[in-house]
Image: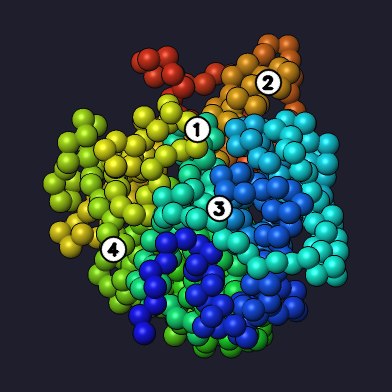
């Protein structure tokens, strides 16, 4: 019997509940949650959201709970009611979250005070309901004891209704919220399922932040969609990942190059961890997987396919997927083929489509591509044209339609999958007393791929100490955004237009590190 067509994420969950009710959906810190138990928790959450908070279709909630079952249940409860979810990183400090919290006008914020105690005194973007993890758990417990749980009255949710707003630095420096519809998600899940040939027998670990597009779309929603089993890891621990793969016979891992570099390092330190024969596939996105890492992964996981992926928040995760094990292909260095129904164009600066093999700006169009940034008409006008999205990446397509990403927008730093936009950090450091000029450039990192380095020109008679600046920064922004190094210089090089010449700064940094 043919399954009915799925148009929204709550239907995706229900399909798996009907097929896989007693099978494990989520495993967290020794506790198993079957699909039936997950569904009960979702129903309970939906009842509380509706009855206690009077939330319904079109309302916005923020989930700053990290990789926990409560996030999963709340997310799908929101999907059932047509509520829009804004996932928020538990790493962010108050200043980092300012733009997001002020722009989304959330009715409720759910947060973990152990990660973000400042939320308790939230003033900027303060919602009607500010709910700590402990308070939410107590509310659910009381509701369950009183048997107030009701069958979910599912809202009328269309494929083009917004499901989530995920904030990304993008390519302009200002934080932009990609508005992902239910249809965007379903198209992404379908592409992953069929291209990677994932089934309900597969299992995976979620070791990366669930608030990011890979964690949310390519792991949580994907494995709920296929009826598989997902092991939530509350914080990244490379040795624990290896133990879980070995002990629970994990079949699929998806992460950034940094994740796999750290796994390789952990395996070298703990060679006795176990057997990885169950792992049939590795998917790697959020950065280029170089040949050296591929070769080392092949030694650690000799029976495992390695599949590079290119994707964006704005493509709901996948844009291109390597169709076979990269080690068996002469296309190594490519990010694979565009997923089904996704059109790719390489354009020049005048938006003219370039010929095969020519390098230019990558534009995308298809059902996984979002159609807007949340309440940001200036960015929408810049990045969306006639159904096409400008990625800001430099790329080319070969004669077989394989996609090769050559570079990113020039000021984006990718630290292990975490995006750092230079202007944001420059603006912040420029406020530090004694700083005259500031420029951020990327520095090579063996573990993270790239890290931020700050070049600072101090005001005359204002001596500065790098440790003092870094400590000041650490209290204002997430740790991954703090520069790994500060270089004091007498002046910043300028180009003919009077702008800071970052190419020259990168060259200077190379010279400094080679000395």
Mark 3 Cα-neighbour bin, 10 Å: few <14, some 14–19, many ≥20: many
Where's the N terminus, which quadrant?
A: bottom left
> What distance separates the C-alpha of mark 2 from that of mark 1?
28 Å
> What distance separates the C-alpha of mark 2 from that of mark 3?
41 Å
- Mark 4, secondary structure of its residue: loop
In this rendering, the label closer to the viewer, 2 or 3: 3
Please report the residue visible at 67 percent of the width from the left and 13 percent of the height from the top: 459
- Mark 2, secondary structure of its residue: loop
> What distance separates the C-alpha of mark 3 from that of mark 1?
19 Å
- In terms of sequence position, does the residue under pointer 2 or pointer 1 come before the other? 1
Q: Which residue is mark 3?
A: 82
Q: Is residue 217 left or right of residue 119?
A: left
Query: Dots 3 and 4: beta carbons under 8 Å?
Result: no
The location of residue 147, given as percent across then percent down, is 80, 70
**Corner quadrant of residue 400:** bottom left
In the image, 270 versus 355, the foreground residue is: 355
Q: Which mark is residue 431?
A: 2
The location of residue 330, given as percent across then percent down, is 25, 70
Q: Which residue is mark 4?
A: 340
In this rendering, the label closer to the viewer, 2 or 1: 1
> What distance separates the C-alpha of mark 2 from that of mark 4?
47 Å
In the image, 227 versus 285, the foreground residue is: 227
Q: Which residue is mark 1?
A: 375
């Amino acid at each position: 019997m043919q399954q009915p067509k799925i148009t929204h994420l709550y239907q995706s969950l229900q399909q798996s509940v009907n097929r896989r009710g007693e099978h494990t959906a989520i495993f967290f810190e020794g506790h198993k949650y079957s699909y039936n138990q997950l569904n009960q928790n979702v129903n309970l959450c939906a009842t509380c959201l509706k009855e206690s908070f009077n939330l319904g279709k079109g309302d916005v909630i923020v989930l700053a709970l990290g990789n926990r079952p409560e996030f999963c249940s709340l997310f799908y409860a929101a999907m059932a009611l047509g509520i829009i979810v804004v996932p928020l990183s538990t790493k962010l400090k108050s200043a980092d979250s300012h733009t997001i919290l002020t722009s989304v006008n959330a009715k409720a914020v759910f947060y973990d005070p152990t990660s973000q105690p400042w939320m308790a005194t939230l003033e900027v973007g303060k919602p009607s309901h500010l709910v700590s993890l402990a308070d939410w758990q107590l509310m659910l417990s009381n509701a369950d004891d009183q048997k107030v749980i009701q069958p979910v009255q599912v809202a009328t949710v269309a494929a083009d209704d917004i499901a989530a707003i995920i904030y990304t630095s993008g390519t302009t420096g200002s934080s932009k919220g990609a508005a992902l519809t239910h249809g965007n998600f379903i198209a992404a899940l379908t592409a992953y399922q069929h291209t990677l040939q994932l089934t309900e027998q597969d299992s995976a670990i979620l070791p990366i932040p669930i608030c990011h597009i890979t964690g949310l779309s390519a792991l949580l929603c994907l494995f709920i969609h296929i009826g598989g089993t997902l092991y939530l890891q509350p914080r990244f621990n490379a040795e624990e990942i290896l133990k879980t793969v070995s002990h629970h016979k994990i079949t699929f891992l998806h992460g950034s190059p940094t994740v796999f570099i750290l796994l390789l390092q952990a395996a070298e330190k703990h060679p006795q961890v176990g057997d990885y024969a169950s792992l049939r596939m590795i998917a790697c996105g959020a950065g280029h997987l170089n040949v050296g890492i591929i070769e080392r992964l092949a030694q650690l996981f000799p029976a495992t396919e390695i599949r590079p992926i290119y994707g964006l928040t704005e493509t709901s995760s996948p844009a291109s997927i390597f169709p076979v094990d990269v080690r068996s292909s002469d296309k190594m260095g490519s990010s694979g083929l565009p997923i089904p129904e996704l059109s790719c164009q390489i354009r020049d600066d005048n938006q003219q489509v370039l010929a095969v093999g020519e390098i230019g700006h990558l534009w995308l169009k298809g059902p996984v591509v979002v159609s807007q940034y949340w309440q940001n008409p200036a960015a929408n006008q810049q990045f969306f044209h006639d159904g096409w999205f400008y990625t800001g990446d430099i790329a080319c397509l070969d004669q077989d339609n394989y996609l090769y990403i050559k570079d990113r927008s020039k000021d984006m730093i990718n630290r292990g999958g975490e995006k750092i936009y230079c202007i944001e950090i420059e603006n912040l450091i420029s406020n530090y007393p004694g700083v005259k000029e500031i420029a951020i450039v990327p520095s090579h990192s063996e573990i993270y791929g790239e890290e931020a380095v700050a070049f600072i020109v101090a005001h005359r008679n204002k001596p500065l100490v790098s440790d003092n600046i870094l400590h000041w920064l650490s209290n204002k922004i997430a740790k991954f955004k703090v520069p790994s190094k500060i270089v004091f210089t007498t002046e910043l090089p300028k180009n003919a237009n009077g702008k800071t010449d970052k190419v020259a700064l990168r060259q200077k940094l190379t010279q400094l590190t080679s000395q």
